[in-house]
Image (tube, rainbow, N blue to C red):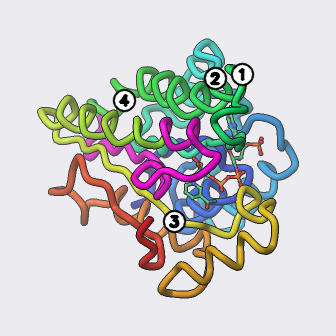
Amino acid sequence: MGNKTCVVTGSSRGIGKAIAQQFGEEGWEVVVNYRSSRERAEETAAHIEEQGGSALIVQADVTDFEAIKGMREQIQEVFGQVDVLVNNAGVNQDIKFSEMSHEDWDTVLDVHLDGAFHTTQTFFDDLVESDGGRLINISSIIGKGGNYGQANYATAKSGIFGFTRTIALELAPHESTANCVAPGFIKTDMVEELPEPIKDQIRDDTPLERLGTPEEVAEIVHFLASDRSSFITGEVIDANGGKDL
Ligand code: NAP
């Protein structure tokens, strides 16, 4: 898959980092995007370069449309056209709905939904023109089942399902695809911050009796980015250890 270019939003840490590193191990040109963790982004980029890929680090907040357009300009100068966009950047701000402020709501919807709008609008023409353009959105098991204290996050992640299916229809005439991965509970900062009893409960409720790893999610993204997935579009692929909310 050498010489193809991918953008992975939020690849300084967690799932995005694993996705970006796997692309690097396969010799891709990888754009490592982050919001504030510069050092972590540099670690991701160093791994990519060590493994034979090429990395470009770009700081850009996905909620800032102008910053994302600026990111595309930087990418064009270094790598040229983008073939794969992975909308991975995410945040949560958990609180039960009766106590949720408008700011809690907006913060989460802005990153996941406005963010996906900004990046996908910006790179849409690249995906159309690429020979094998791929949009891959990272949603969540929570978008399907909801979760106590996560009305904002569940709403955003459900929105990603409809977004993916619609963009899939609009990319299809160009032989490009859009798909979605819906992970269960994965061992990253987002989940590590939960209290131990809640993590124990999650493990107990998961048939495979453990949290997933970022690398296990990255494997699916890599399949979806590859030519091997060429007849799959508009789909949601679950990776949740059998957990059914
Ligand atoms: P994480 O470890 O907290 O990492 C979040 C990443 O997103 C970081 O790289 C962060 O950058 C970046 N980011 C956050 N806000 C951003 C913004 N406004 N602009 C650009 N980048 C931004 O999270 P994770 O667990 O890997 O989650 C990655 C994705 O998977 C998210 O969409 C999440 O909702 C989804 N997901 C996670 C789980 C799970 O169990 N962990 C399950 C299902 C779905 P900085 O480092 O610079 O802050």
Up-down: is 102 above or below 186?
above
Q: Amino acid at mark 1?
A: Glu
Amino acid bearing label 2: Asp
Q: Which residue is mark 2?
A: 106
C-alpha gap between disc 4 and disc 3: 30 Å
Earlier in the chain: of badge 3 and badge 1, it is 1
Q: Position of residue 173 (x, y in %)?
A: 12, 33
- Which labelled disc corresponds to residue 103? 1
Query: Which residue is pictured at 53% across the width and 42% down the height?
Result: 7
Residue named by callout 4 = 126
What residue is shown at x 59% (from left), y 59% (from top)?
53
Q: Is residue 5 left or right of residue 33?
A: left
Q: Which residue is mark 3?
A: 184
Q: Are discs 1 and 2 less than 8 Å apart at CB?
A: yes
Quadrant of the frame with the N terminus? bottom left
Of discs 4 and 1, which sits in the foreground? Answer: 1
The region drawn magenta spans: 130-156
**Res 224 → quadrant:** bottom left
Magenta stretch: includes residue 85: no
Name of the residue lying farthest toward the right: 39
For numbered disc 2, what is the local secondary structure?
Answer: helix
In whole angstroms, how far apart are the C-alphas of marks 4 and 1? 33 Å
Amino acid at circle 4? Asp
